[in-house]
Amino acid sequence: MDILSSVRERHAETYDLHKRYINPQFVRVLEVIGFKRNYVSSKGARLIDTEGREVLDFLAGFGVFNIGRNHPLVAQVLHQILDSDPASMVQMDLGGISGMLAEALTQITPGDLDAVFFTNSGTESVEGALKFARQATRRHKVVHCHHAFHGLTLGALSVNGNREFREFNEPLLPGCIQVPFNDLEALERELSSGDVAAFIVEPIQGKGVFVPDDDYLPGARQLCDKYGTLLIADEVQTGFGRTGKMFAVDHWGVVPDIMAVSKALSGGFVPIGAVITKRSIHSKIFDSMERCFAHSNTFGQNDLAMAAGLATIEVLQSEKLVEQAAEIGDYIIAGMTEKAQRYEMLHEIRGKGLMVGMQFGVPRSLTLKTGWKLVHKMNDDLFGQMITMPLMEKFNILTQVAGHGLDTVKILPPLMIGRKEADMFLDAMEAVLKDVHRFPGAAWTTTKNLAMRTLKSA
């Protein structure tokens, strides 16, 4: 079977196949916002489409490609494993490579996190973390935050703070309590009952890129200790160098009881995730030979995923990508902060490392305020597309809107980008900001037309 030839021959059918067999609504979205590109190859921070256009990838698969796309070392390691005829997933035996990856993870995670359970995704890692916390504490309540995103399976969705994902799925898990992010008083009110199994939190929230005050996570750690609640850090997106530290909790010196990871650990090749916890907690779940399968999955320890994880950690460390993320992230944040002082609709730049949110808001001038109100009257999610669409159409830079109704544009570029790519982005943002600060003008006309196309396709 010559799969590559078949794929190349049928590239032109990609969107038709997805319309017919997968998700036609997502195809419509891509067509309406002008993101229909049909990519055929990628390398590092760049994507190539069927027309040979090179796109700078500042989305990185929602944070999967921290080491860049198709890194040669990870590919080489996977070829080695495949060529070795591995005895993978025997199930009634153990794989050496999974033990090696578990050891490597415990060496880079903070504090005494020394027990690992492997999963296949971020949401599965969160599901495992919730189960571990409930079993270890013999409590069932879980506290989570407004705007939190922890995944879309039913357990993870129960601690999701975004209404648009929760609706049509209720009732969800009982005992899941929502509190404002970055509010220690609200957190203590819920924990003080003494019956909460866990507080689950993203150290930096992915939806909107909300960064907590410096006392928040250390304070949450103290409150969890005070009331016997386990602290779960969801590092699915923030982990493995994304924020300029190996893990985001390292910015505040906080050691969680349980950490959920995934995304970038894969190197972008094979899905993988992990629940990393303290041995004292792990031993309360797997507490006897009869309960050696108290939590289990089929593919979690497959050799290809384990090898990809080991190779990814090696690349992060040997190429000093965590340090590079901190340096280039500071450079981009400084550049965008300077623009926020000159462009009145750009209100705030949030983030750490290469996880950056650009917050837009109501302008001061009457003319621009008129345009702002018109756009938001048409659709609360429309303004962000005024930024992301021209970045793609005119400058071939892929970005995303950070969440529903937030007026926030978010970037998650691969950690291996340098000043050249950062300057390309900053120069493109300068041009886009200049356009959207002219009302009436081409950017506003394009947005109006987008709204009309959306209405017609609804």
Image: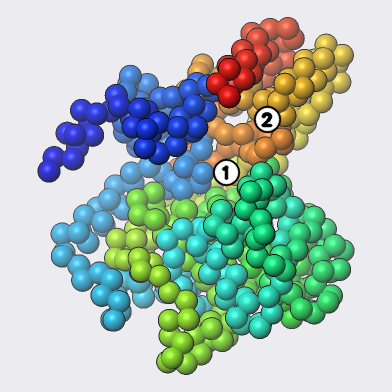
Report whether 213 appears left or right of 297: right
Residue type for callout 2: Asp
Crowd tier of the residue under label 1, counting other residues whose Cα lies within 10 Å: few below 14, some 14–19, many 20 or above: many
Q: Determine whether the residue tagged by mark 2 lies in a helix, strand or loop.
A: loop
The picture quadrant where one finds residue 132 is: bottom right
Q: In this view, does 279 lie above or below 186?
A: below
Q: Which residue is drawn at 62% across and 25% down?
A: 385
Above or below 389: residue 177: below
The image quarter in which residue 55 lies: top left
Visible in this render: residue 442? yes
Identify the residue at horizontal 50%, vertical 32% (top origin).
25
- Give the distance between the C-alpha atoms of the residues marked 2 and 1, in whole angstroms: 24 Å
Image quadrant holding the N terminus, namely: top left
User: Which mark sits nearer the N-terminus, 2 or 1?
Assistant: 1
Judged from the image, the secondary structure of the residue bearing numbered disc 1 is: loop
| Residue 274 horizontal side relative to residue 228, left or right | left
Amino acid type shown at disc 1: Leu
Q: Name the residue under label 2.
A: 381
Residue 205 visible in rendering: no
In which quadrant of the rendered view does residue 378 lie?
A: top right
Callout 2 touching callout 1 (CB < 8 Å)? no
Which residue position is annotated with label 1?
354
